[in-house]
Amino acid sequence: MPSNSDLIAHLLESGYADARVADAMRKIDRINFIPAELAPHVYHDTPLPIGHGQTISAPGIVALMSKLLDVREGMTVLEVGSGSGYQAAILAELVGKRGRIITLERIEWLVSFAKENCNRAGYKNIEFIHGDGSKGHSAKAPYARIIVTAAARSVPKALTDQLAEGGKLVIPVGQPYRQDLLVIDKLAGGELRTEPSIPVIFVPLIEGY
Ligand code: SAH
């Protein structure tokens, strides 16, 4: 069975992780974010079911999204789709103690699951909110970075509105079983510039339920 270090070595070799993301992933063990019976698969680069029809993303995708988001210390980051809390914990490590993560989740049970997992991992700079993330969270906007970990049909306007100038949004956009991972930069003056990264498959972003 591979270890967390084997997994991280693979992510560095494949280019999914850079050195900063790899350091964060070394500190956060994926074993604390999955159902116990899936432990034999925890350090494989695959998504795993976490209940309620949802999944924890493959570590390669978590690493790549974290790298593309280019998170710096002290930033406030909005995440849509808390799931297991694994991605939120990695972001919390990357922003450091002066930074803050706000993570939104539509399934109440997963809000508690993510919260427990992140608390156990020792992160106090994460705020968990139950609600429709496609509307963002205007109370704390604008955000330096926004990450969406569920597949959208199109980019929700609320999210680009709540992105700071000079900010970055990483979001999978497309059809139910095939999306492009988009990196959207908001330039000074508000203009949006979109760069597609790789094709991905995420569970759907449920909007306006
Ligand atoms: N980032 C997670 C993986 C998330 S899977 C991790 O690290 O484990 C996608 C999550 O998005 C699911 O938990 C799903 O319930 C949630 N989701 C789907 N639509 C949503 C919406 N409109 N608002 C908030 N969360 C949503």
Image: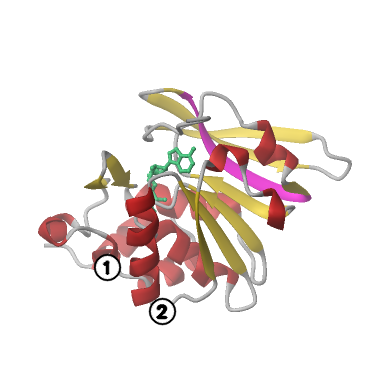
Q: Considering depth in this image, is 27 or 104 the residue closer to the camera? A: 104
Q: Secondary structure at mark 2?
A: loop
Residue 145, x across and y down, in percent: 65, 53
Which portion, as a residue range, is magenta? 165-174
Q: Considering depth in this image, is 72 or 100 the residue closer to the camera? A: 100
**Residue plotted at (61% across, 49% down):** 146
Crowding around mark 2 (Cα neighbors within 10 Å: few <14, some 14 to 19, many 20+) is few
Residue 90 against residue 122 in the figure, above or below: above
Which corner quadrant holds the N terminus? bottom left
Q: Quadrant of ligand 1?
A: top left
What is the residue that sits farthest to the top in this orientation?
175
Which residue in the protein does label 1 denote?
A: 32
Specify whether 3 is left or right of 159: left
Tell me, yes or no, whether the highlighted magenta stretch contains residue 166: yes
* Three-letter residue code for mark 2: Gly
Residue 150 against residue 24 in the figure, above or below: above
Residue 52, x across and y down, in percent: 26, 42
Q: Earlier in the sequence, mark 1 or mark 2?
A: 1
- Residue 177 in sight: yes
Classify mark 2 as within 8 Å of ligand 1 or not, answering yes or no: no
- Residue 13 in sight: no
* Three-letter residue code for mark 1: Asn
Residue 111, x across and y down, in percent: 40, 56
**Residue plotted at (27% across, 68% down):** 32
Residue 117 against residue 120 in the figure, above or below: above
Q: Considering depth in this image, is 89 or 69 the residue closer to the camera? A: 89
Residue 156 against residue 168 in the figure, above or below: above
Which residue in the protein does label 2 denote?
A: 122
Specify whether 112 is left or right of 153: left
